[in-house]
Image: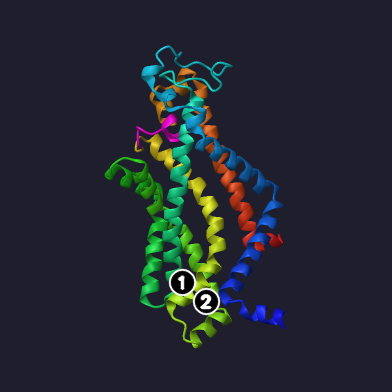
Amino acid sequence: MSGSTATTARSPRSMAWARRGRAFGGFCRQFSRSRTGMVGVGFLVLIIVLAVLAPLLAPSWMLDVTRLLDQPRFAPPSLAHPLGTDDQGREIWVRMLWGARVSLLVGFAATVVSMTIGTIVGIAAGHFTGWGGGLLMRIIDFFLVLPSLILAIVLSAVLTRGVWTIVIAIGLTSWAGTARVVRAQTLSVESRDYIERSRVLGAGHWHIIVKHLLPAVLPLVLANTTLTVGSAIIAESTLSFLGLGDTTQQSWGTVLKNSMDVSAATAGYWWYILVPGIAIVLVVLAFTLVGRAVETIVNPTLRSR
């Protein structure tokens, strides 16, 4: 009797949260079986920890050129200078640690902006029929055709230079791909029977979107998010390399820009180029490995293969 009373006392909300907890636990177990995904996660955790601990591992005075007058310029990698020094005597590894903070911040923040816009527009384009949905679809197609990097360059050149300008520029130009994926998933969910039952029972647009459509598209959004972060880091590096970033902040793109300014490629200062270049490649590869692992779990077609 008491057991049946306890079961009856459970609210639908608590049951829904329990179901989501079980689903999340199953997702974590499946992800832990992916070797490539775990390698990507391990590398990203290492980079994030180093970026967070940058003020402790490399105090900010190590970037102050006025206090580095005795440091050798363009010193190659050695025991004294593990990754070499730049044209002003600053240690490359110090610049890489501080640059990781800005590059990761821009990557995550721009992805949040992009995913938010893409999810909202994609759900609206798939849920609402008629001229409203058609108009949203035309907007998505316009941003898909428009080169996002060129638009980001224009926005970065027009707006005040800074880290958050780059975040806005990347976020506002990279959401169309997510919107198209979300719209396709929304159309698939809309054709299911429980959506029709909700409409018959009097559910409005807000209830259907929040209770049914959003939970259904979130797994795909999560998989797309991990892939988009890598693209955002590349975009930030490109904008900084072109001189459109914040020159007062360290980032991996800024290090590459400085190496180009001193003609490091032709002068033989190979470490000045390889270190930030390899760092960008490895971080983007790690995000790609995590994204593919997540995509394999949330996409039954890929999982069956």
Of label 2 and label 1, which has the lower sequence position? 1
Q: Nearer the viewer, residue 196 or 260?
A: 196
Q: Quadrant of residue 144?
A: bottom left
Q: Quadrant of residue 238?
A: top left
Residue 60 horizontal side relative to residue 188, left or right: left
Tell me which amino acid carries mark 2.
Glu
Residue closest to the far front: 2
Tell me which amino acid carries mark 1.
Gly
Q: Nearer the viewer, residue 66 or 74?
A: 66
Q: Say which quadrant the C terminus sits in.
A: bottom right
Q: Nearer the viewer, residue 265 or 164?
A: 164
What residue lies at 46% left-to-right and 51% top-to-bottom? 111
Q: Secondary structure at mark 2?
A: helix
Tag 1: Cα neighbours inside 10 Å, few (<14), some, or many (≥20)? many
Tag 2: Cα neighbours inside 10 Å, few (<14), some, or many (≥20)? some
Q: Are marks 2 and 1 in contact (CB under 8 Å)?
A: yes
Secondary structure mostly taken by the magenta-highlighted segment of the chain:
loop
Q: Which mark is residue 98?
A: none
Horizontal and vertical percent for residue 244? 34, 38
The reply to whether the magenta stretch includes residue 253 is yes
Q: Nearer the viewer, residue 153 or 221?
A: 221
Residue closest to the far bottom: 200
C-alpha distance separating marks 2 and 1:
8 Å
User: Label 2: which residue?
Assistant: 190
Residue 289 horizontal side relative to residue 201, left or right: right
Range of magenta residues: 246-255
What residue lies at 50% left-to-right and 48% top-to-bottom? 229
The reply to whether the magenta stretch includes residue 146 is no
What residue lies at 58% left-to-right and 77% top-to-bottom? 11
User: Label 1: which residue?
Assistant: 126
